[in-house]
Image (cartoon, grey):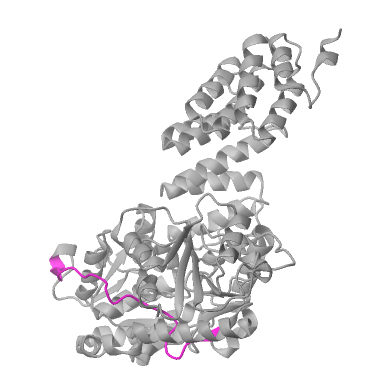
Amino acid sequence: MDAALAVPSPAAEPAALFDAARRGQLPLAALMERAQALQNAGAGDAAARLYETWIANNRSPALHAACFNWGTVLSALGRHDEAEAAYRRALALQPGFPPAHLNLGHLLERRGELDGALAEWAQVIAATEMPSPATVDFRLHALNNSARALETAKRYPEAEALMTRSLQLRATQFDVIQHYVHIRQKQCEWPLYRPVGEVTPNQLLMGTSPLAMMSVTDDPAVQLLAAQRFVHERVPRPPAAPLHAAMPARSGKIRLGYLSGDLHHHAVGLLTAELFELHDRSRFDVWAFDWTPDSATPQRQRLKQAIDQHVRLAGVDDLTAAKLIAEAGIDVLVDLQGITSGARPAILGHRPAPVQVSYLGLPGTSALPGVDWILADRYVMPETLLPYCTERPIYLPHCFQVSDRRREIAPTPERKTYGLPDDAFVYCSFNNNFKFTAEVFAAWMRILGQVPGSVLWLLADNDAARENMLRSADAHGVARERLIFAPRVSPQEYLARFRLADLMLDTFPYNAGTTASDALWVGLPIVTLAGRSYISRMAGSLLTAAGLPDLITETLADYERLAVAIGRTPSRAASYKRYLADEGRRSPLFDVPQIVRDIEAEFERLALAYRR
């Protein structure tokens, strides 16, 4: 009988499959089909044994392909050492086999062996220098994953170089364009939109992520466009029926649910601890639904202790997560992540709660289906901005941003500890480098040029950003030693060193948020530039609530003039410091109990309106 006719049917007992594999009567295509059926049925171990049996009893020219597939099954089962052996066996049989190199690289990366992973992908890149239609996707896979891994490791110039090669090969890769733009922001590579390959200016703009776009322009229409494109491409279409509608009617205390993967030492986690702690437990139950990596850090533990009911969503699919929220009877679900890295917007699309609100995670419109409200104040979100936001505003009376009055501050260090001159006027900007723009950095250089002896104190997240800033200083005729770079330190020391500066210079169009709150809490005044978008008005909102609206400007020229005027009159900076020391912490900005009561009043109003 022809061996092909002896192949067991899909319904055959696994024993018959194994017998056919042992007797050499199971063709490779049938083997792959039957193994996949076993995996789909939840019998991954049986699929792995079937491959192992077939490989031990067959001498096919395609044995390397079977070893590769065996490795993928073992990897899916978490049997990584065995998977590695299978991939290496495939490569021994067929040296240079791209799929095996690619998957072996992923396995090594998951194990934390970055150099090993890069070496595997480099072999694919080297073998496909002149790619054919059959190998071009392998080459792109190797280039893109190498670039992603290098970006994660903050090896930005190497990552950018690989992204450039990838885009020169295929221009229509929006994921790669997104990372290419943002990695240039992180390195302070100006101009930001450098042409590459056949990528058009429109593709560069359309490939800019919503978060990156907030550092590019304060045009609210362009920011809305970026958010809508992200939602269209990345967020599943929501089902017609909201999950919460199938749940029993609620009564009793209002249940607040906070949704986030950033409840740790992250801007969101740093701002919200006291919010959770101060919620009125006689009226509200406070739940957290989060997928934050767990840790024993004090901030993580404090956040967990401030929550009444904590539901871990790590490893839980989006629909199941939404069902857990709906079954918990959450009245108001507060999304603390928006469409930033690691967000899970599909959960919100299922509408597990009748009231769903955006807060803090994305300071602007997310365009997410299922998010109807955004916490704001009338400064950060004026009525002229409303046409460009898919969410409706929940206006708080004073300031949209909560903060934490329990921030620990180390003793004030001496200036010489950080290489600062004792007699200089010290400007600072401790914002992330991706918020820096060529236009504002040029203004900073002109400010230094007009204030003799002044220095600018900055963070540099990476060597490339540092060198690019120094080159910009050279181009503006500013001596390099007038730029002083601060190292990363503990949170307590970070707060303490704000006291060594005389004036903080805000970034634009992506204003400081948590950093501005930190500076004002410690007593450092800020000059900001307010624009048209929510995120470009954040620091202005904080300064208004702190009682210092005269430090808000509306043009770059005015921003520059005000910073120079204060720098030339150090006593003026000192008076702002005295005001913040005497009045700042008593201002509405830091009246956290009142802000929490204002938030609760709005959440209660919306929840009760739905119940009625």
The quadrant of the rendering that contains the N terminus is top right
The quadrant of the rendering that contains the C terminus is bottom right
Q: Up-down: is 543 above or below 129? A: below
Q: Is residue 133 left or right of residue 564?
A: right
x%, y% of residue 576?
A: 25, 88
Give the residues in magenta.
393-416
x%, y% of residue 96?
A: 58, 23
Secondary structure that dominates the magenta span: loop
Number of labelled discs?
Answer: 0
Q: Is residue 424 left or right of residue 270?
A: left
Residue 410 is inside the magenta segment? yes
x%, y% of residue 202?
A: 66, 63
Residue at 72% in and 18% down: 17
345 or 602, nearer to the observer? 602
Residue 412 is inside the magenta segment? yes
Q: Up-down: is 229 above or below 131? A: below
Q: Up-down: is 142 above or below 287? A: above
Q: Can I make out residue 61 in this image?
A: no
x%, y% of residue 449?
A: 30, 76
